[in-house]
Amino acid sequence: MVRVRFAPSPTGFLHIGSLRTALYNFLFARKNKGKFILRIEDTDIKRQVPGALENLIIVLKKMGLDYDEGPFLVKLKNKKLVIKQKGKYGPYIQSQRLKIYQKFAQKLVKNGYAYYCFCTQAELEKMRQEQIAKKIPPMYDERCRKLSEKEIKRKLEEKIPYVIRLKVPEEGRIKFYDLIRGEIEFDFKNIDDQVLLKSDGYPTYHLAVVVDDYLMKITHIIRGEEWLPSVPKHLLIYQALGWQPPKFAHLPLILNPDRSKLSKRKSDVAVESYLNLGYLPETILNFIALLGWNPDTNQEIFSLDELIKEFSLEKIQKSGAIFNREKLDWMNGLYIRNKSVNELTKLSLPFLINAKLIEKINRKFKIIQTKEIVDFNWLKKIVSLEQERMKKLADLEQLADFFFKEKLDYSAEILIWKKMNFPQVKNNLKLIKKNLLKISKNKFKTKEIYKTLEKLAKEKGTGEIFWPFRVALSGKTASPPPAEIAEILGKEKTIKRIDEAIKLLNYEDSKK
Ligand code: GLU
């Protein structure tokens, strides 16, 4: 049975590249009716961040990448969240498996595949500096590999701290087959005697990853290309322990449009940032699925189920994949337009609340600036108007803030349509007001408003009427059509905004 794993080191946020690794493992497992395992590689104590594991589990859940074995967050009766592990190959958190790694490290020493190294940090640093001075690549010079049995015994008895290093053959090459890259060969000459166990008893990544992939019966290792150079060391450990290695598949790098490596410095790489901006989880998955994989057709939009059906390791490319933010925006806009207004409104609520436009009060909402109480249906009308324009959920704040404001802040200039002057615009706004006042409050609906103003527009010109009307209501040069806005604002506020626009023009006029 296929068993694959996602093995992040929790750093406090989930990198876009890691999410792609998780996704491909997930797709491969689901496609092959296998198991998908989450394993936490937290053996680098210096890099530990409190809450990082919980955050990781929450993000994976938000993204819908459910796994079969590993640590899960469970809510207790008292609502506290605790981590519980599921699966018979646990624990799945490496810091809880130290004894296992220590046992195998000692076994490797005993069988002659690894050795104790008693060099101090200072000695290692000196060695490095000397090598740099001699212009040779810095590597451990293997001095402890040559210690006699007696010397080793004495140092151990004296309790001198040690690490355990892998004995990498002095010469020769090692070959292996990568499912994406084909046959790859490495020369031992360039490979350091890797530390496997540190002096504090913690394993390095290299030892822990091999031991766990073996004990957890992993069949395929699917991970980023940056781990490729580690493979020869891992293969040596597999050999030394008499284990059959899993199959390997190394995924292409994700690049910025300028082909530099996607990094924190140049772009947003935290999946959380994208979720916080209102990129939908399904967009993010669809988008990153295509970073390095495509099904050889023109299809670009895939549901998770379609991805499971179509996915295969053979169709993963070797060359780097460009992270194109414009494409992400385009795709998210498409997903947003395909949502029902009801769902989109629900999804938008946290963004409106976060932007401090509204707050939730029981089952209704209070507009923070005006203190009015509105309901879900009112918000739905706004979302429906803006749905076409939204690229991400957070856009709603910019697009629709005028519905929630007490007073708009814009410059009088933008009320002007083409070659009109202030007095003409003012006059038209007065006419608009006069006509709108004729509509009764309960008939103040889009259609009726149009009908009323169309007559006026025939006489004065469409832009001459609808442009200043729209700007008066929204304070913006781009917005949905004004009659729709007017209906949502209601008669009173519509009239008030027209009055304010007239006032603004008066004020500007008086300055001249
Ligand atoms: N812990 C490694 C990481 O943070 C995992 C590498 C692997 O999958 O072997 O990405």
Image (cartoon, rainbow, N blue to C red):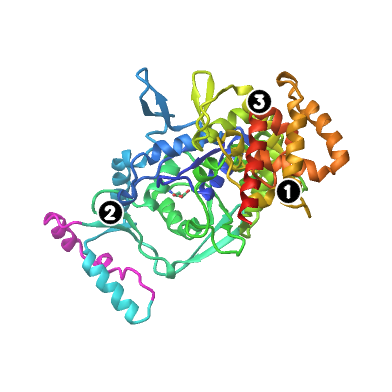
In the picture as drawn, the residue positioned furthest to the bottom comes out as 134
Regarding residue 302, the answer to whether it shows in the image is no
Q: Which mark is residue 14?
A: none
58 or 459: nearer the viewer: 459
Which residue is labeled 3 in the image?
A: 342
Instruction: Give the x, y percent position of residue 505.
Output: 66, 47
Kind of element beneath mark 3: helix
Q: Counting other residues with Cα less than 10 Å from the Cα at mark 2, is it few (<14), some (14-19), or many (20 or more)?
A: some
**Is 49 on the left or on the right of 501, as rendered?**
left
**At 41% across and 41% down in the image, what residue appears?**
40
> According to the image, label 2 marks what residue?
198
Amino acid of disc 3: Asn
Q: CA distance from mark 1 to mark 2?
A: 81 Å
Mark 1 or 3: the one toward you: 1
Q: Is residue 395 visible?
A: yes
Which residue corresponds to mark 1?
423
Under 8 Å from ligand 1: the CB of mark 3?
no
The correct choice, above or below, for 138 with respect to 426 in the image is below
Task: State which quadrant residue 212 falls in.
Answer: top left
Mark 2 element type: loop
Q: Is residue 209 magenta?
A: no
Whichever of callouts 1 and 2 sits on the residue coming sooner in the sequence is 2
Question: Quadrant where the N terminus lies?
Answer: top right
Quadrant in the picture for the C terminus: bottom right
**Ligand 1 within 8 angstroms of badge 1 C-beta:** no
